[in-house]
Image (tube, grey):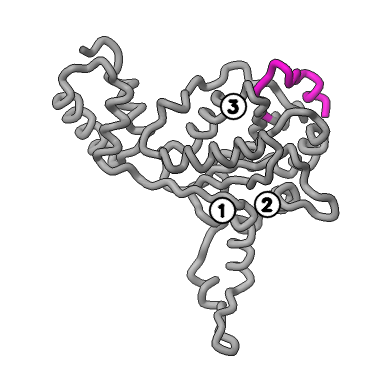
């Protein structure tokens, strides 16, 4: 893997696979999001931190799937995780869904290194006919060769089962001897997600949690009532309350308020 020669993991906490160069490129500008700045997802934070700390300590740990509503902090949680644990040996490699066919090659080149690697797949889902999930399956659970102990996969998705679900698939299920036997398509959909031992769900924010996220972004504003009115109006115009909306509200109105 030619691009991997340029990555010095002693000083590089994260890299991304670039298909045009068939290798890894060190990420030069990391998102500085801090663990403590995330709001409304404390349960998910605790669960992912526990799993990651076990992974870093060489204890049994799971691959993780973060699924749920858009803009609720799934990707931000992964970025904050790197910032929190990079000094403890955590390294992250981001791989786009379309490049998952290269995943076995990527893993082969890092499996003997001293660092602990999370393969990060953002916004992961598969459509009918796509085959990239087969390479992902082999890394999640191995085939003849066991998956490496220093690699875990953390993925985010809006879909719980990662693959499309159709009513026709349910209609093909049948009862045998009083037991429900799912159709093959459903088994395929569920089997991929089942390989993620840790599954964390994310939901749209309540108004209270949304305003807590806004408050965290505007710590010096004195007129909270006016701030909340503007933030609620902004979210209503977008039609969604989540962490992303709070960030966008800050980018539009932040700076100079008191």
Residue under numbered circle 2? 133
Residue under numbered circle 1? 162
| Residue at disc 3, secondary structure | helix
Dot 1, how many residues are within 10 Å of its Cα: few (below 14), some (14-19), or many (20+)? many
Sequence-first tag of 3 and 1: 3
Left or right: 229 in relation to 204 = left
Residue 134 lies, in percent from the top left, at 72, 53
Q: Disc 2 to disc 3, how far (Cα)?
A: 28 Å
Q: Are marks 3 and 1 in contact (CB under 8 Å)?
A: no
Q: Are marks 2 and 3 in contact (CB under 8 Å)?
A: no
Q: For the view shown, which residue lies furthest in the bottom direction?
A: 177
Does residue 231 show up magenta in the picture?
no
Task: Name the front one of labels 3 and 1.
Answer: 3
Residue 79 lies, in percent from the top left, at 53, 29
Q: Nearer the viewer, residue 111 or 159?
A: 111
Task: Name the front one of labels 2 and 3.
Answer: 3
Sequence-first tag of 2 and 3: 3
Q: Are marks 1 and 2 in contact (CB under 8 Å)?
A: yes
Image quadrant where residue 57 sits: top right
Q: Nearer the viewer, residue 45 or 201?
A: 45
- Chain part drawn in magenta: 1-16
Residue 85 numbered tag: 3
Image quadrant where residue 6 sits: top right
Residue 102, above or below 187? above
Does residue 10 show up magenta in the picture?
yes
Point 67% across, 31% down: residue: 93
Residue 110 lies, in percent from the top left, at 79, 32
Dot 2, how many residues are within 10 Å of its Cα: few (below 14), some (14-19), or many (20+)? some
Point 82% across, 25% down: residue: 2
Q: Disc 1 to disc 2, how far (Cα)?
A: 9 Å
| Residue at disc 2, secondary structure | helix
């Amino acid at each position: 893997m030619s691009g991997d020669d340029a990555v010095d993991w002693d000083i590089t906490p994260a890299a991304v696979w670039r298909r045009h160069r068939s290798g890894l490129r060190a990420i030069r500008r990391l998102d500085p999001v801090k663990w403590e700045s995330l709001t409304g997802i404390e349960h998910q934070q605790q669960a992912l931190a526990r799993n990651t700390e076990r992974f870093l300590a060489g204890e049994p740990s799971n691959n993780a799937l973060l699924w749920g509503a858009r803009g609720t902090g799934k990707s931000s949680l992964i970025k904050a995780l790197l910032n929190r644990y990079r000094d403890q040996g955590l390294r992250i490699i981001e791989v786009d869904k379309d490049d998952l066919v290269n995943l076995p090659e990527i893993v082969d080149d890092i499996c003997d290194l001293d660092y602990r690697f999370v393969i990060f797949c953002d916004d992961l889902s598969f459509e009918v006919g796509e085959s990239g999930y087969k390479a992902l399956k082999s890394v999640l659970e191995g085939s003849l060769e066991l998956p490496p102990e220093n690699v875990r996969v953390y993925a985010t998705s809006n879909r719980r089962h990662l693959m499309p679900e159709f009513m026709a698939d349910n209609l093909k299920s049948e009862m045998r001897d009083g037991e429900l036997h799912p159709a093959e398509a459903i088994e395929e959909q569920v089997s991929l997600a089942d390989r993620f031992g840790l599954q964390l769900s994310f939901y749209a924010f309540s108004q209270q949690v949304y305003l807590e996220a806004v408050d965290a972004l505007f710590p010096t504003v004195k007129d909270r009532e006016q701030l909340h009115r503007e933030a609620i109006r902004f979210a209503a115009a977008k039609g969604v309350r989540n962490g992303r909306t709070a960030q966008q509200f800050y980018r539009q109105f932040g700076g100079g308020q008191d």
